[in-house]
Every structure is written in structure tokens, then in C-alpha cells.
Image (cartoon, rainbow, N blue to C red):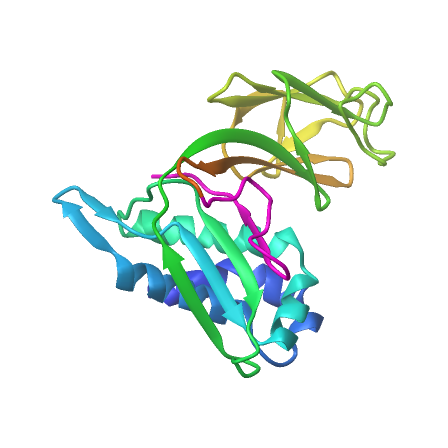
């Protein structure tokens, strides 16, 4: 299977699922992904026998009409693109100098359906931040134990009758995570299997009642030199962007 096929499969959920109605014409997310992949491959620089450096800061330009449609997805599209950039770089043994930044910008000089990518290599520091994505909402884990449940005393409150008041907890020690069921009535599932306690890998899915909770470890990048943006900030009016993804 080719690399482009892998990229396309990575966005299949978005294109064929909740985002499908948004993209009936014009630029498609898979075309942005392909453009990012080409930019990475073109700009790959051999530093040494064991180190190939690639850009980690990307500006994706498109027609204003396409940008309007992409913007409706908010951070979800950026998360998908960053994840696929990471996976492509890992498959080629490419390395980044810092966290990955992708920003989408409108460009009136481009026609609908066209995309252009500009990139730079920006040295930066990376702070690892564990988060729980619950039905599209993101909860940063700000302490060592995060309790999930239906009760108001839980750190992450679920509007779910299938959840106990204190249903499960996620533990984070700064480098590893575990999930532990807290004696819930209906039990906890990890990646589709019942679990009492287990190690959590990035992108693991915890199921509690009807709720789907995705554990992610995101890298917030801050440039060491002037001109960078902090995590979640845009780079000027009309941008859709953010910093996510580990440095290799």
C-alpha cells in the first residue's frame, strides 16, 4: 500500500463520516494531506547518516471559499492533519526540530480546489500534555489522577446514565498513563474489551456507557527564538491552526 493510500485512510473517518456533507465540492481534506506529505518529502534534509530533518511548521493556503468550509471543523481537522504528518514522518524515519504547527490561511490568489503549502523548520521546546477527548470536547489532565463519572465531584463529568458517579480514573505520572475502573456498576472498556486496570497507550479508547473517551498525549510547542506562536494561537487574522504533535 502506498503512502498516499495510508494518508487517505487516515482521513476516511472525517470524509465519510461527520464531515462528509461539508465537502461535496472544492478542496478535500485528503488533498491537504497529500500536499503536506509532498512538502515534507521535498524539504527532507539529510543531516547525518541517522538524522533526516524535515519541516515542522506548515502554512496551508487555499481559496477563501475552501477556507470557510474547512474552518467549520475547528481543531478536529488540524488534529487529523498533525497526526498524519507525524505518522508519515515516523514511517520514513524523518525527524522534527520541535513540535508540529499547521495553520490554514485563505489566499485570494488561489482558485477553489487549489492548495499551496509553505513550510519552515523551527527549533522549539516541547511540553507533553495528556488530554481526554470526550465526545468532541477536550479535557487537559492537570493532575496525577483524573476521575471520570456522572457525579458533580468527578473531574470529567459525563451526561450518561450508563456511567457511575465515580466510574473510572486515569492516572498520569508524567510519562505513562493507566486507566482504572472504580468499582462501577456497568464496567469500563478499553479498546472494546472489559478492563479493571491497564496501561493506556496514546489514542486508546475508553468506553463508559454511551461515552467514548480518547486518551491523547499532545506536544505543545513553543519556539525558542522570536516569531513563534504559543499552543493554540493563530498566526494572524483568518488562520485556523495550532501546535500539536511530538518531535521525533
Q: Which residues are magenta?
A: 227-248
Residue 1 visible in the shown view: no
Q: Residue, x 33% and y 59% (percent of image)?
A: 40
Q: Determine whether, in the image, residue 43 is placed left or right of residue 188.
A: left
Residue 152 visible in the shown view: yes
Nearest the eye: 148 or 110: 110
Asked whether residue 99 is drawn in magenta, I would say: no
Asked whether residue 228 is drawn in magenta, I would say: yes
Q: Quadrant of residue 77?
A: bottom right
* Residue 159 x/y as whole percent: 85, 36
- Which residue sits furthest bottom? 111
* Residue 234 x/y as whole percent: 59, 51
Nearest the eye: 195 or 240: 240
139 shown above or below 183? below
Q: Quadrant of residue 237?
A: bottom right
* Residue 126 x/y as whole percent: 44, 33
- Which residue sits furthest front? 226
- Which residue sits furthest left? 49
Q: Quadrant of residue 146?
A: top right
Quadrant (top left, top right, bottom left, bottom right) of the N terminus: bottom left
Give the total number of marks visible in the rendering: 0
57 shown above or below 27? above
21 shown above or below 202? below
* Residue 30 x/y as whole percent: 50, 68
Q: Residue, x 63% and y 51% (percent of image)?
A: 75
Q: Residue, x 29% and y 44% (percent of image)?
A: 95
Quadrant (top left, top right, bottom left, bottom right) of the C terminus: top left
Nearest the eye: 66 or 198: 66
- Specify the principal SS of the magenta part: loop
Amino acid at each position: 500500500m502506498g503512502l498516499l493510500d495510508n494518508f487517505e485512510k487516515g482521513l476516511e473517518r472525517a470524509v465519510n463520516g461527520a464531515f462528509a456533507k461539508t465537502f461535496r465540492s472544492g478542496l478535500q481534506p485528503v488533498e491537504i494531506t497529500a500536499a503536506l506529505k509532498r512538502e515534507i518529502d521535498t524539504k527532507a534534509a539529510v543531516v547525518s547518516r541517522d538524522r533526516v530533518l524535515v519541516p515542522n511548521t506548515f502554512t496551508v493556503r487555499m481559496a477563501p471559499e475552501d477556507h470557510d468550509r474547512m474552518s467549520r471543523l475547528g481543531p478536529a481537522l488540524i488534529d487529523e492533519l498533525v497526526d498524519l504528518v507525524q505518522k508519515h514522518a515516523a514511517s520514513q524515519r524523518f525527524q522534527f526540530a520541535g513540535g508540529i504547527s499547521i495553520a490554514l490561511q485563505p489566499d485570494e490568489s488561489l482558485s477553489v480546489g487549489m492548495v499551496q503549502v509553505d513550510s519552515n523548520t523551527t527549533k522549539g521546546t516541547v511540553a507533553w500534555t495528556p488530554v481526554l477527548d470526550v465526545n468532541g470536547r477536550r479535557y487537559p489532565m492537570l493532575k496525577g489522577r483524573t476521575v471520570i463519572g456522572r457525579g458533580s465531584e468527578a473531574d470529567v463529568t459525563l451526561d450518561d446514565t450508563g456511567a457511575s458517579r465515580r466510574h473510572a480514573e486515569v492516572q498520569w505520572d508524567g510519562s505513562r498513563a493507566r486507566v482504572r475502573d472504580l468499582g462501577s456498576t456497568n464496567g469500563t472498556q478499553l479498546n472494546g474489551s472489559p478492563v479493571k486496570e491497564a496501561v493506556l497507550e496514546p489514542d486508546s479508547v475508553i468506553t463508559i456507557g454511551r461515552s467514548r473517551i480518547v486518551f491523547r498525549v499532545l506536544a505543545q510547542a513553543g519556539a525558542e527564538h522570536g516569531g513563534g506562536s504559543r499552543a493554540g494561537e493563530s498566526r494572524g487574522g483568518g488562520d485556523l491552526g495550532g501546535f500539536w504533535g511530538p518531535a521525533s
